[in-house]
Image: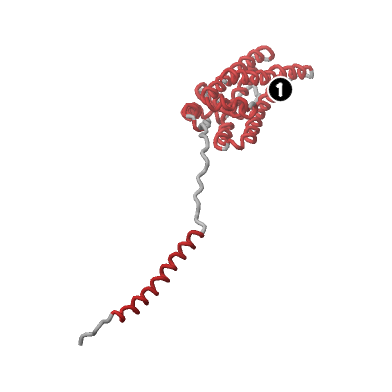
Amino acid sequence: MPVNIHPTDSAPHADSVAQHVVPVQADTAALKATADTTARPVIEVPEPVQAQPFARSPLHDTPSMALLLTGVLAVTLCYHTGYKYIENFFHYMFSTRRRENLFEDHTVNETSILAALIANNCIVEGFIVYFAVQLLWPGFADSLKSQVFTHIAAFSGMAVGFYLIQWLVYKVMGYTFTDQTGSRLWIDGFKSSQSLLGLVLLPVLVLLMLYPAHGKVLLAVAAALYFSARLIFIFKGFRIFYSNLSSILYFLLYLCAVEIVPLVIMTSVTYWICGILL
């Protein structure tokens, strides 16, 4: 049966729809107002900072590390022909016996292993002096970091020259104040103490490169090892040269002229080299 729809019947329906739509619009506006008042996360953009140049160190300098590895590699390659010399380190450092035991083997060719050990010692000392200069004279720090290999090569060359000068002085003193056997024993003590010094300083240098923040402590350890090696050599020299009470005076003069003054001179030479390379 058809249903008659009158205009008066649709009016209430429109009013009911309007009554339902208006609250929805009101709720949306309220949500927008609430969202606008809610705190939103803010992304903070940091202020631009001027780029700093990369501070180079021996650990990150390829020529410097190549120089260090060359010394270590030389010792490694010469070890198979000169291991007997390394085994007899303490014999050469402490023994003052003028006649060798027939059962002791010292016939090995010591030239190659000794040269490698001395070269390694001079290179390691050059690295340690590099770090010591930064601690003693901070004004040279920028120059040292900008020319790492140049300074290390100069310090290593200085160590080689210092070793050769010491060897020559000890040779002359041994020839002057003792016989050929005593001079040989004294020089053997010097060479062995310096050779061993390079090996014991190498782990300290590795720690110094890896942990530069502990430089003061590690440099103190390196200095203690250096002076220990010198004291062992000085003690052996005293045993060789001591004959009576009057020889003590000559020994004290020797300490001042040969052991103390050269270190002061080398400190001045180091400062002079840093000034030239600045």
Can you say whether 186 is above or below 32 in the image?
above
Q: What's the residue type where badge 1 is placed?
A: Phe
On the image, which quarter does residue 267 sit in? top right
Q: Which quarter of the image is occupied by the C terminus?
A: top right
Residue 13, percent from left and from top: 33, 78
Relative to 95, is 61 on the left or the right? left
Horizontal and vertical percent position of residue 40: 50, 56
Q: Is residue 52 left or right of residue 180?
A: left
Q: Secondary structure at mark 1?
A: helix
Where is mark 1, residue-wise?
238
The quadrant where residue 160 appears? top right
Identify the colour scheme used. secondary structure
Name which residue lies at 40% across and 74% down.
19
Residue 82 visible in the snapshot: yes
Residue reaching furthest to the left: 1
Quick check: 51 above or below 191? below
Count all numbered tags in the image, as a single digit: 1
For label 1, the crowd category at 10 Å Cα-Cα, with few meaning under 14, some 14 to 19 and many 20 or more, is some
- 275 or 129, which is in the foreground? 275
Q: Position of residue 7 (x, y in %)?
A: 29, 79
Of residue 69 and residue 129, the one placed in the foreground of this image is 129
Residue 56 location, x and y as percent? 52, 31
Residue 81 seen anywhere in this rendered image of the structure:
no
Residue drawn at x 65%, y 19% is 268
Farthest right residue?
Answer: 245
Q: Nearer the viewer, residue 222 or 3?
A: 3
Image quadrant occupied by the N terminus = bottom left
Q: Which one is nearer the viewer's eye here, 3 or 183?
A: 3
Q: Above or below — where is 88 with respect to 29?
A: above
